[in-house]
Amino acid sequence: MKPTSLLVLAGLLLPAAAALADDELYKAKNCMACHRVDRNSLGPSFKSIATRHADAKDAEVMLAKKIREGGVGVWGQVPMPAQPQVSEAESATLARWILGLK
C-alpha cells in the first residue's frame, strides 16, 4: 500500500477511534452507575443532557465542571456526586462526547 493511501486510511479511522475512546471513557469512569446513553436511570440520559444544553454557548465547560464537582437541582433533587477521580481533560472529553449525542 502506498504511504499516501495509509495516511488517508489513518485519517478515516481516527475519528472513529476517538469516538470509541470517549465511549469507553464513560464506562471506565463509572458514569454508567447512574446514567445511560438513551434512557433515564438514576440520573438523566446522556441524550437528554445533550438536548437540554444544545444551544448553550458554555455547555462544554459547564458540563465538565458538573462532572468533576457534582451538583443538585438541575434534574430534580437527586444529587450528582462529585467525581474527583476524573481529570479536567477527561471531564472535557466526556462533556464533548455527551453534547455530541443530541
Image (tube, grey):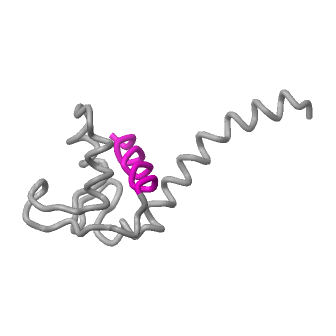
What is the x, y in percent for residue 91? Answer: 39, 55
* Magenta span of residues: 88-102
What is the x, y in percent for residue 26? Answer: 43, 61
Q: Main secondary structure of the magenta part?
A: helix
Question: Is 14 placed above or below 71 here?
Answer: above
Is residue 95 covered in magenta? yes
- Judging depth in this view, the residue of 47 and 89 nearest the camera is 89
Q: Which residue is drawn at 92% across and 34% down?
A: 1
Name the quadrant containing residue 56. top left
What is the x, y in percent for residue 12? Answer: 67, 35
What is the x, y in percent for residue 33? Answer: 33, 72
Name the quadrant containing residue 60. top left
Is residue 87 covered in magenta? no
Q: Residue at x 55, y 54 (%)?
A: 21
Instruction: Assign the C terminus to one quadrant of the image.
Output: top left
- Judging depth in this view, the residue of 70 and 28 nearest the camera is 70
Q: Which residue is drawn at 59% across and 43% down?
A: 16
Question: Is 96 placed above or below 25 here?
Answer: above
